[in-house]
Amino acid sequence: MLWSQDELPRRRAGIGSRSFKSLRFPLWTQNKARLIQAYLQLFVYITRHGTYIDGFAAPQDADHLGTWAAKLVLEMEPRRMRDIWLCDLSPKGAAKLEELRTVHMAPELKPKRRITVLAGDFNTRVFEILQSGRITDKTATFALLDQRTFECEWRSVEALSRHKTTNKIELFYFFPTGWIDRSIAAVRRPEKREEVERWWGRPDWAALRGMGGLERARLVASRFEQELGYGKAEVFPIHDEKYGGRVMYHMIHASDHPEALPLMVRAYRKVSGRPDLEGKEEQLDMIDLLRDIQDEGAADCRTESASPKPGCSPSL
Ligand SMILES: C[S@@+](CC[C@H](N)C(=O)[O-])C[C@H]1O[C@@H](n2cnc3c(N)ncnc32)[C@H](O)[C@@H]1O
């Protein structure tokens, strides 16, 4: 169990104003699924129900299923995530999702939830999910968009953001900071250019090349707020090594819910955490802590060209 009873949110009020202990520690790629799980566990404890959409859901590493987000979300206890949509384009990946579904829908578990596996392109199938009638304004809904590079089209993100008229569908959008420069530099053919434009949703995608990692991630986050109307979008770095190293992804977390950001900071801290700091009285303002997370490692840890430096590895 990731969270003890004492750590779970007790009251709606208070979470947002609570301050957090200091963190100087990165979260690495192996733990990104645990971050999603830890966050959802906290959030669903408040909402008492949830719908989970995983657009790019097959396991990235079939040999290490402990890093598979869909699996960790399905394993969450209590089972408050009641409606689960898992999509993947690869036939092998979709077969893995079917296997996962079979395990979790076994009759002896008396499942009180629905798991729908969709084989195919999420950019098409997302419309089926939204038109299913199963996500209403009252349904707390979360979408994980764990693309590798250019697979998640902007129109899909837009459709998710527009579906609900109350709190929007919350998004965990993975932006490929670690290789975006190289990927953009390699775009030559007209079909590839069209693909990248569908991903970015605008013709100015080439301007992303050469920007600083954090600056670029914040630009993406600002689109979630300004173009899609999210109340808050923040960026969370995911590093390539356990104790530092360059940023591979920025996870952009977009939500309308006032408690979402503090809970994500808390989940990030828990998963990347410093057990040795637990229990100490060092308290920081939540926004200070968020900046601390975002600035983790020196700026040169974030660029593609930089080799890891001692300063990129926080001392334990
Ligand atoms: C980064 S991996 C996902 C990792 C997974 N979330 C995990 O926790 O291990 C990206 C996945 O997206 C799938 N994919 C690529 N293009 C897609 C598309 N257009 N629609 C749906 N899935 C797609 C790939 O087959 C791959 O399984």
Image: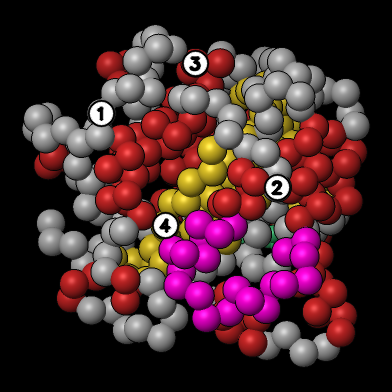
Mark 2–mark 1 contact, CB under 8 Å?
A: no
Q: Earlier in the sequence, mark 4 or mark 3?
A: 3
Of marks 2 and 1, which one's residue comes earlier in the chain? Answer: 1
Q: Circles 4 and 1: CB distance less than 8 Å?
A: no
* Nearest to N terminus: mark 4 or mark 2: 2
Residue 3 x %, y %: 34, 26
Residue 61 falls in image quadrant:
bottom right
The x and y percentages for residue 190 are 86, 84
Which residue has dot 3 on it?
46
Q: Tell me the residue that label 4 is attached to.
A: 237
The quadrant of the rendering that contains the C terminus is bottom left
Q: What whole-number distance in Å separates the C-alpha atoms at marks 2 and 1? A: 30 Å
Q: Is residue 229 above or below residue 4?
A: below
User: Measured from the top left, where is residue 41 in percent x and y?
Assistant: 47, 27
Task: Say above or below: 106 vs 23.
Answer: above
Q: Which residues are magenta?
A: 199-220
Give the structural element (helix, strand or loop) at label 4. strand
Earlier-in-chain disc, 2 versus 3: 3
Left or right position of 21 against 73 = left
Residue bearing mark 1: 19
C-alpha separation, residue under disc 4 versus residue under disc 2: 22 Å
What secondary structure is found at the residue carrying circle 3? helix
170 is higher (above) or lower (below) than 271: above
Label ID, residue 227: 2
In which quadrant of the rendered view does residue 264 lie?
top left
